[in-house]
Image (cartoon, rainbow, N blue to C red):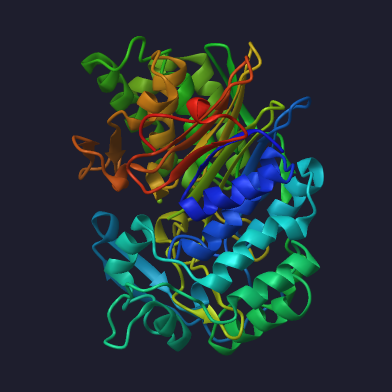
Amino acid sequence: MGRLAVAAPSPEAADAAEQVARAGGSAVDAAIAAALVAMVTEVGLVSLSSGGFVTVQPSARAAYAVDGWMDRPGIGRRVDAPPPRTWDVSTEYGGGVEITIGAGSVATHGSLAAFGEAHARDGHLPWAELVAPAIDVARGGFTLGSASRYYLRHVHESIFGWDPASHAALHDDAGRLTEDRVVVADLATTLEHVAAVGPRALHDGDLADAIAADVGERGGLLGRVDLAAYAPVVREPLTARVHGWSLATTTPPSVGGVVLAAMLRLMEDRPRAGWDADDVAHLVRVQRAVLGHRREVLEVAADLADASRAWLDRVDADHRAVLESGSTAHVSVTDADGSACSLTVSSGYGAGMIAAGTGIWLNNCLGEQELNPPDRQVAPGERLLSNMAPVVGRHDDGSTLAIGSPGADRITTAVVCALAGFVNGGLDLHAAVAHPRVHVHRAGLPDEVVRMEDALSMYFGGVGAALTRSDGSLDAVADPRREGEARVVGVSPREAPSGPR
């Protein structure tokens, strides 16, 4: 039996990680199994039609990041083809968001392909064993968790009600958001196919054909060629050295990793003992500088990798000069062997449609307006922008850490607040995750708002963290802002995680 710590979005996802650990699975195995269950249960937040990033710290090798984020579809599409069919929905979710949905908002998904790459490198169990818990949950049904229900209360009709299959899965006979267990037709069968065929099942073969055909018939860009051409990319991660920790996170096309790395470097070892008013003021300055640069430069850069390197070089050269000038699910796992896996996945806000005969809710990542600025053109087959920033770390004493968060544009600020409190401020992991946060919304614009958290709110993310200490002891924390689950597997009850979870 493997020993590991896991922070997952739900008890069902944590159950999957525990099941895999007890069968001898690695941190990567457990994280993938938990994420696959989340793709079933976290309706409206993530599905099999998702993109994501997997950051891994192997026990005896350098960290790496697997980019499984979305591609823009439309490879080989005729120039005289009709425009993709989409429409906009206004919702009060997240303080007010304009969302583009419909078949034309569906991008080329990549999460499962990325999972397959990480599994090939650092998985211990057969692929089918990682999918088995998700099959069981899909077959038996599930109740909507708090994060999913909160989102769906705003959009269950406007986004998830226009497609008959989607409406039937989520609504009772009176048209209200269901209070019963949700069983999505065809989803268990689809997952059985994924288990048998492997992580390329959504890109090659009958299942990929079915998805592409339905999207095309309903006016979308995603085609068979897009799915077949998709490939995950293994990248050297961005790194930061903080108080003995070597922290690794995602590189472009995730702008989130660059933002996170810049914020950590600019924090200047703050907070030094908890969070005082001066530390919070400094954090606001850091967020204002970095998020403003993101909006003005990184999001519109012709070459995001070059712009990111130049920005981090400037940060390293002169902190003072710099400072004065977007729905997701996350899993963190560390194991007793000293490995760590942090993965974040998203389907955007959802296109509102289930691909016919598959049970798969499709993404709307072409319709996330904050990640598709009009002055940043992406060609078919190229990656879209992302906020994601899953982090793994190794301390000089041998401890390992996995941490990350969902929360759209609050991902980086949530993770920085928790990480800085833990690695700089002397807070234990539970206190660092639970501590009130700050987020600078629309930094540098006339309508900028500095939002200080006075009561725990899901708006400020949902950090999940797992820790293996140098003495081999394990700990895990799930953010009290969401109904996540923290669990330590393979230890006695007195060693299990305590505090908020």
**Foreground residue among 12 and 48:** 12
Residue displayed at 59% across by 30% down: 491
- Residue 348 visible? The answer is yes
**Foreground residue among 171 and 385:** 171
466 displayed left or right of 367 = right
16 displayed left or right of 88 = right
**320 above or below 479?**
above
The quadrant holding residue 28 is top right
**Foreground residue among 213 and 286:** 213
| Position of the C terminus by quadrant | top left
**354 above or below 234?**
below
| Position of the N terminus by quadrant | top right
Could you tell me residue 146's position as x and y percent?
34, 56
The quadrant holding residue 441 is top left
356 displayed left or right of 117 = left
- Residue 444 visible? The answer is no
Residue displayed at 78% across by 25% down: 60
Could you tell me residue 66's position as x and y percent?
69, 45
The quadrant holding residue 39 is bottom right
**468 above or below 206?**
above
Could you tell me residue 166's position as x and y percent?
44, 80
Task: Count the numbered circles shown.
Answer: 0
**Foreground residue among 244 and 380:** 244
229 displayed left or right of 377 = right
Residue displayed at 36% across by 67% down: 99
Could you tell me residue 397's position as x and y percent?
63, 11
